[in-house]
Amino acid sequence: MNLKQYNQLTLLFYFFDFYQFALFFFYSNCISLINLLLFHIFLHFILLTNQQLNIFSSIFKRNSQIGDSGVSGLGYGLGKCTNLSNLTLYLGRNQIGDKGASGLGSGLGKCAKLSNLILKLQKNQIGDKGVTDLGFGLGKCVLLSNFTLNLKCNQIGGEGTSGLGSGLGKCPNLSNFELNIKLNKIRDECISGFGSGLAECTNLSNLTLNLDQNQIKDEGASSLGLGLRNCTNLSNLTLILSENQIGASGASNLGSNLGNCTRLSTLYLGLGWNQIGDAGASGLVSSLGKNTNFSNLELFLHQNQIGDQGVSSLGYFLGKCTNLKDFKLFLRENEISDQGLSSIVSGLQKCTNLYNLTLDCWQNQIQDLQQSKVKCLKLKRLVVLQMD
Ligand SMILES: *[C@@H]1O[C@H](CO)[C@@H](O)[C@H](O)[C@H]1NC(C)=O
Ligand SMILES: *[C@@H]1O[C@H](CO)[C@@H](O)[C@H](O)[C@H]1NC(C)=O
Ligand SMILES: *[C@@H]1O[C@H](CO)[C@@H](O)[C@H](O)[C@H]1NC(C)=O
Ligand SMILES: *[C@@H]1O[C@H](CO)[C@@H](O)[C@H](O)[C@H]1NC(C)=O
Ligand SMILES: *[C@@H]1O[C@H](CO)[C@@H](O)[C@H](O)[C@H]1NC(C)=O
Ligand SMILES: *[C@@H]1O[C@H](CO)[C@@H](O)[C@H](O)[C@H]1NC(C)=O
Ligand SMILES: *[C@@H]1O[C@H](CO)[C@@H](O)[C@H](O)[C@H]1NC(C)=O
Ligand SMILES: *[C@@H]1O[C@H](CO)[C@@H](O)[C@H](O)[C@H]1NC(C)=O
Ligand SMILES: *[C@@H]1O[C@H](CO)[C@@H](O)[C@H](O)[C@H]1NC(C)=O
Ligand SMILES: *[C@@H]1O[C@H](CO)[C@@H](O)[C@H](O)[C@H]1NC(C)=O
Ligand SMILES: *[C@@H]1O[C@H](CO)[C@@H](O)[C@H](O)[C@H]1NC(C)=O
Ligand SMILES: *[C@@H]1O[C@H](CO)[C@@H](O)[C@H](O)[C@H]1NC(C)=O
């Protein structure tokens, strides 16, 4: 191997499976031990001879069985590369648990110059302890500015999210953050800790939180909102809370807090398959209405028991969003009739800057869609209309 020293390195373990490699050469019961030994020797060689690395990317094939020990070793090696600024690690589906996540966290905590980080850890077995330690480590990376973290399909309850939040709250430069934590076991009790962590990130400008399919109820949605409203620089928010157990008060409180983020201009809010009902829908939009700076707005409200009463305030709110350029409303499988649709469409008449409109009201009680369609087509800037 070449002993030349690099400051930028990309390792693709994509076509190279350590497990099979070991299997091929040593058909024994100690496969995973040998496999690990090889991995450590390799890492030691690469990382410890290249400590001046600025940029490091590594993509591990899924199922290459890196495991806790492998990831801890990786963290240890990376911790020696104290000048690292950009790091990308794809470690999805690799049998990583708490120990591995902790090891990675303590390593990364030594990379004080880290500013761009992509960490894909989906489909592993990481629980609360691992995520808390990862958050604690990352809290030492005070220059962290762009961070993508994928923890989809792990075993994180509430405490882990809280630990992650309080870690990231120590990263004042964080401005772009994308967290996918769908399909975990996140409960209400600990979301406030996560929220107050994020509340410290006042530079946060683009935020994506995917909390799809967890166990979040009203209290959780409310405390998340309480955190987000302190992120005063937030301009672009994607918040996915579909398939949780959020009711009317959760949706209203979320809306009233998001209404305080006055710089918010792009919002995707996914609340499908919850139970927000009429009161939740009108509470949500009437408080969001404190902010009329929206230019791109997407509300995903599938299957929420919303009727005409719920959408009547939607029309009023939309009427105030005169900067709206792109609006998508998904109301599939609710209880809206022609009257409700007509109040939405009347509100939209005031959005004279609207270019794109999507209204999905499939499976409601609407008889005359055509009439509303004709009304929408009168919007003078409209380029794209999708309505069904
Ligand atoms: C990190 O960068 C600084 C300045 O660019 C340099 O002096 C130092 O030797 C580097 N550290 C390592 C471990 O390469
Ligand atoms: C690190 O990544 C960021 C964002 O992708 C990029 O703007 C920057 O140029 C990268 N840094 C280096 C040293 O290449
Ligand atoms: C935030 O980043 C800027 C450069 O982008 C740097 O000057 C500043 O020191 C950083 N702030 C903290 C608290 O690290
Ligand atoms: C963060 O990402 C943005 C957009 O990709 C880039 O312009 C910016 O330079 C990055 N920040 C740092 C500190 O590299
Ligand atoms: C926000 O980011 C800017 C650089 O983008 C930095 O100078 C400033 O210190 C950050 N704010 C806080 C509160 O750290
Ligand atoms: C938001 O900021 C206010 C005032 O700065 C503070 O009192 C409150 O505790 C913060 N909220 C959270 C959730 O941190
Ligand atoms: C965030 O907002 C503060 C004031 O609210 C401002 O000083 C700072 O520059 C902003 N940061 C960014 C990245 O816009
Ligand atoms: C927010 O994200 C958009 C699109 O990725 C990007 O153009 C913009 O620079 C980001 N904002 C900041 C403050 O990095
Ligand atoms: C908002 O953020 C999303 C996700 O990061 C990005 O795809 C989109 O381009 C951003 N939009 C704007 C207007 O910055
Ligand atoms: C939220 O908005 C209300 C009314 O608009 C205002 O009284 C309150 O101070 C705001 N809170 C924060 C944290 O910005
Ligand atoms: C719209 O955003 C600007 C800053 O981008 C802010 O000063 C203003 O207060 C916002 N307007 C409303 C009605 O929230
Ligand atoms: C409208 O939607 C099209 C794609 O359907 C997109 O290319 C365009 O940028 C959108 N325009 C606005 C103003 O959002």
Image: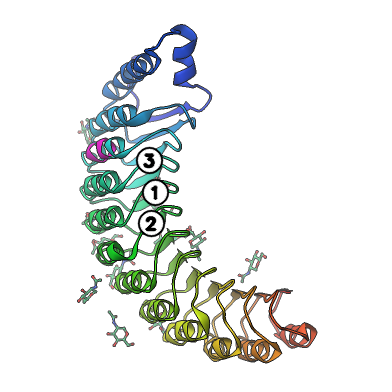
Q: Which mark is residue 249?
A: none
Q: How many marks?
A: 3
Task: Give whichever of discs 1 and 2 has the lower sequence position.
Answer: 1
- Classify mark 3: helix, strand or loop: loop
Residue at mark 2: 177
Alpha carbons under labels 2 and 3: distance apart = 23 Å
- Observer-nearest of 282 and 138: 282
| Residue under the point 44% across and 20% down | 18
Task: Give whichever of discs 3 and 1 has the lower sequence position.
Answer: 3
- Disc 2 crowd rating (10 Å Cα; few below 14, some 14-19, many 20+) is many
In the image, ligand 5 is in what quadrant?
bottom left
Provide the residue span drawn in magenta.
Answer: 102-106
Give the amino acid type for the residue marked by disc 3 in the picture. Gln
Give the amino acid type for the residue marked by disc 2 in the picture. Phe
Q: Is residue 183 above or below residue 346?
A: above
Residue at mark 1: 149
- Observer-nearest of 234 and 270: 270
- Disc 3 crowd rating (10 Å Cα; few below 14, some 14-19, many 20+) is many
| Residue under the point 23% across and 57% down | 166
Residue at mark 3: 125
Q: Is residue 202 above or below residue 315?
A: above
- Disc 1 crowd rating (10 Å Cα; few below 14, some 14-19, many 20+) is some
Label 1 CB less than 8 angstroms from ligand 9: no
- Classify mark 2: helix, strand or loop: strand
Alpha carbons under labels 1 and 2: distance apart = 8 Å
